[in-house]
Amino acid sequence: MFRIDHYLGKETVQNILVMRFSNGIFEPIWNRQYVDHVQITVAETIGVEERAGYYEQAGAMRDIVQNHLLQLLALVSMEPPAAFDDKAVRDEKVKVMRALRQIAGEDLSTNATRGQYTSGFIEGAPVPGYREENGVAPDSRTETYVALKLWVDNWRWEGTPFYLRTGKRLPKQSTEIAIQFRVAPHQLFSREALGGLEPNALVLRIQPDEGISLRFGAKVPVQGIRIRAVNMDFDYGASFMVDAPDAYETLILDALRGDATLFTRHDEVDQQWAFVDPIIKGWADAPGGPAPYAAGTWGPGEADELIERDGRKWRKA
Amino acid sequence: MAQGIVIDTMFWGARAEGVAALERELARLRRVQSAHARELVRPIARASVLNLIVYADREEHARRAARSISELALRHPSRAIVVLADRGSREGVERRIEMHCQLPIADGARQVSYEQVLVRAKGDVDDRLASAVIPLLVPDLPVFLWWTGTPPLGSRSFGDLLRLTDRLIVDSADFARPEITLPTIARISEDARGRFGLTDLNWTRLTPWREIATSFFDVPSWRLFLEGITGLRVGFAVDMDGRDIHPSQALLLVGWLASHLGWRPLETLAPSEAGGLLFAIARPDGARIMVRVRPRFERGLDEGDISGIRIQATAGPQQAEFVVKRQPSPRHQTATVVLDGEKRWERTMPLPSPAIVELIGEELSILGSDRTYEAALGALVELA
């Protein structure tokens, strides 16, 4: 059986593996010692569209987190497989899924946040709130936004949190993984010079504008030292001059060939559900509902608190 | 229906329906550009080190800003988002936002291209403008907001855009009512603390005047006069009819001196002849300083530019005058010190007159806020 998660068919998702495991320079710093935290974002500008019947039952947790977000998390956090074949790759993914710390009970409110969009503006046009959409209950408690703080309890990632967020009706469409590195251990430059410096980040852009960028500090060309964060950019389209093949086409071809590497195995899916189910249940039992956020904003204030409590910020995606 | 601005697609690029289409178009343009460059074995780097949002409500201002950005593209390649609020079509027009994009090659070089997006707002789009700008920002890069004209404090779109901004750039030379607007800017600067930096191109223009005024008092024996200032006159340029009165630069100079020398208001700013201002300030020792801000017509100056400074002071029995004039030409300053009626020192030096593009270029290299400017503004607010 071939279980499709079309995210795994995307060029840039496959490129996570290529980047990590075909290059010698990234893997040595891909761990708790150098990585401060990881942010994974799946942001959509669309609302529930014609899928209210399904979405009312699913919500963002089942629609995006359980499959796409956890897949991205697995690819970015897994150990190097011994070979690029279906067994080796999927074994490693299952292993890292098993290392995910459960979010349940008291941890729920500090490590998980849900939201639901209200009316607002997307790209300059007014859009209705979720509860005003066709086929949505006027008192619906379905979440259209989720933010999570996760821990991967293993040797590599001890103490490095993973922040995941996804939502509908966010200001822009963007899927990306950002590896934020620790700051330099000792700063030579004055506070004024450092005004524009931000920690190094390696950003894997899944869509749109597929590519990879590395943020680092550079000297502004003026007299004296002023430092500014700049991006070194790799752009898929401009480098290879072709459009990436469609994800489903890739996967169907793989399925015809009998290559299951990019398909999810049953034990992987089991682990994903084992992680999300307690959160879904906790929310169902909790008194309130999802926190409202206006369409066109980056989610509810609670999501900002979730990350700012740790002295960190969501990226300007 | 009101006739709106006609967008020149040669200049602003093709129109794109929505952000996704716009990004696709930019990607296509990049691909065309790099394919062409490969043929010529001369690769073009896509470069951007900052997001620059320009807000303009007139097409000519938007164009002028776009040209400045082009001239700066080698030094500060950016994703430039020019917001043109089409006020001419505000009434009876469907509210909508249109976008155009272009991939201009930086002036003076064929290797660097930057990205220019025009966001054209029709009708009253105050509540939704930011939602069209946010998705256009390049992730992770600092955001500069260059607001041409007077910033509307209560407006939602201004507030929304400020929340995205790392540094706000205004030009108080463009403010129609500086005595009202400068205090407004001061309030913005107070709100800004720790959130975003603020700068005023007019303040940058003052730099050579501040330098020369400071240099008088570097001389140890003249330093004593600093505590004994009795009068201050600042002249600023007006056009021949004396209609365009822009005293912001002159006022900022007064605010700067007041903040550094601990001057306190005695009488609030009051208008005097021909658009000037006359008022009294108290020194820390309580003595009275008469301050006169005077409009003057001088050929070759832009309206609002400082034409001269005269500081009168006493130290013990000695009387002194420290004078800076634009002599022998508007592009030179001559500084003179007169002690007890006798000229004791004189020096002439070139006075740079940077164009907007140079001023902006300088400001784009700074991210933080300018404490000295904030203090000068704060002192002005107390005087107003």
Image (cartoon, helix red, strand yellow):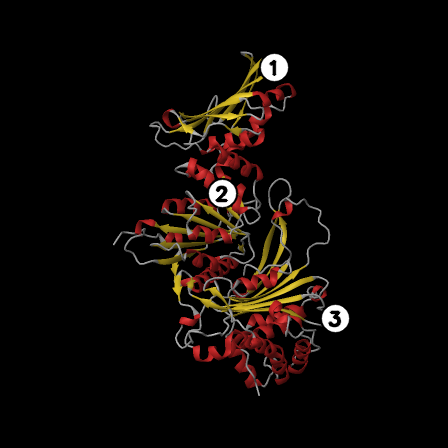
Measure the alpha-carbon separation of dots 3 and 2: 51 Å
Q: Secondary structure at mark 1?
A: loop
Tag 2 residue: B187
The image shows residue B345, relative to residue B366, as above or below, that is above
Tell me the crowding category of disc 1: few under 14, some 14 to 19, or many 20 or more residues within 10 angstroms, Cα based: few
Left or right: B22 with respect to A146? left
Q: Secondary structure at mark 2?
A: helix
Picture coordinates of residue A67 (x, y %)? Answer: 57, 77
Dot 2 falls on which chain? Answer: B
The image shows residue B72, relative to residue B288, as above or below, that is below
- Count of labels in the image: 3
The dot on residue B316 is 1
The image shows residue B383, relative to residue B152, as above or below, that is above
Residue located farthest toward the bottom when viewing the structure as drawn: A1
Left or right: A74 with respect to B341? right
Dot 1 falls on which chain? Answer: B
Comparing A178 with A305, the one in front is A305
- Callout 1, which amino acid? Gly
Picture coordinates of residue B336 (x, y %)? Answer: 54, 19
Tag 3 residue: A155
- Callout 2, which amino acid? Arg
